[in-house]
Amino acid sequence: MKPNFELAGKVALVTGATHGLGMAMAKALAHQGATLVVNGHTPEKMIAALESYAAEGITAHGYLFDVSDAKAVNEAIDKIEKEVGDIHILVNNAGMIKRVPALEMDPEEFRQVVDLDLVSPFIVSQRVAKTMVKNQQGKIINICSMMSELGRNTVSAYAAAKGGLKMLTRNLATEWAKYNIQVNGIGPGYFATEQTAPIRVDGHPFNDFIVNRTPAGRWGDPDDLGGTVVFLASEASNFVNGQIIYVDGGILATIGKPAGEK
Ligand SMILES: NC(=O)c1ccc[n+]([C@@H]2O[C@H](COP(=O)([O-])OP(=O)(O)OC[C@H]3O[C@@H](n4cnc5c(N)ncnc54)[C@H](OP(=O)(O)O)[C@@H]3O)[C@@H](O)[C@H]2O)c1
């Protein structure tokens, strides 16, 4: 049988899709036929985002709400279901990182990161899954990180949250598989986004470290995530439950090599 990657007739909500990786994944889902709902929390960024979607011929439905606020999430999803339709695909992408040495980190800052990167995917998934259970179908994709597996200086809160998100993915997959809801994750490696532009230049120590550390020998392009998100959103992945697919150019597969070695 021909595998089915078609998303026509499906409604996809991507959180934090006003720029960056969320926007790239949202565009991939829409180009594959999904009706797209994008979330963000800054009005000006949403306006610019909707223009960017329209420039690619995508009609995106924009909804501003704070994914860490359970009441706001419940109200927004009620509205989306009324105005656009039941959500079949949820990508929990909104996230943040704070780089502070663990000895100096204020516990309140630590909580903020865990709140957005771990508690919010739970809040949004719980609400959306209620409708998915009713419909006996759904796809939930949590955007994890290599820091779901590895530590690194200054990112204790982020690593704790993304490691937790990996286990939340496995647990929700376990609880909801019986409703024909598949919960999986994507762990992006180092990606060329606006934020990393200043350090992505030859000779910059961090750029050279990443290029040397990555078997593929380059930064990821946000479009590199498109195939994986479409696969996990489509019927082609109906027997894939609780997996994290690392799209990292091979970083997690290797111990790395000394600088200068080809
Ligand atoms: N960039 C990488 O190389 C990389 C690597 C591994 C994993 N990741 C993960 O991939 C995801 C996206 O990363 P990114 O670099 O593309 O992020 P980004 O450019 O900083 O975008 C974050 C998005 O989340 C939204 N957002 C932030 N707080 C929100 C809230 N409380 N409620 C609703 N939306 C909120 C932002 O909306 P506004 O536009 O309104 O601010 C924005 O659309 C994150 O989960 C990140 O941890 C990224």
Image (cartoon, rainbow, N blue to C red):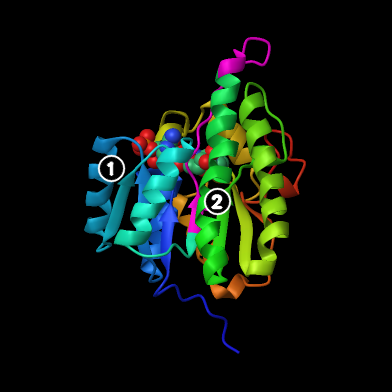
Q: Which residue is mark 1?
A: 46
Q: Dot 1 surroundings within 10 Å: few (below 14), some, or many (20 or more)? A: many
Q: Residue at x 51, y 75 (%)?
A: 5
Q: Is residue 5 above or below residue 13?
A: below
Q: Quadrant of residue 99?
A: top right
Element under disc 1: helix
Q: Residue at x 46, y 50 (%)?
A: 222
Q: Is residue 3 above or below residue 194?
A: below
Give the residue furthest to the bottom.
Answer: 1
Q: Residue at x 29, y 56 (%)?
A: 61
| Viewport quadrant of the C terminus | top right
Q: Position of residue 197 (x, y in %)?
A: 41, 34
User: Start and end of the magenta stretch?
Assistant: 90-108
| Viewport quadrant of the N terminus | bottom right
Q: Position of residue 6 (x, y in %)?
A: 46, 76
What is the distance, in whole Å, between disc 2 and disc 1 at their CAs? 22 Å
Q: Quadrant of residue 19?
A: top left
The answer to which of 104 and 131 lies nearer the viewer is 131
The answer to which of 115 and 46 lies nearer the viewer is 115
The answer to whether residue 213 shows anywhere in this view is no
Q: Report the magenta stretch's main SS.
A: loop
Disc 1 CB within 8 Å of nearest ligand 1 atom: yes
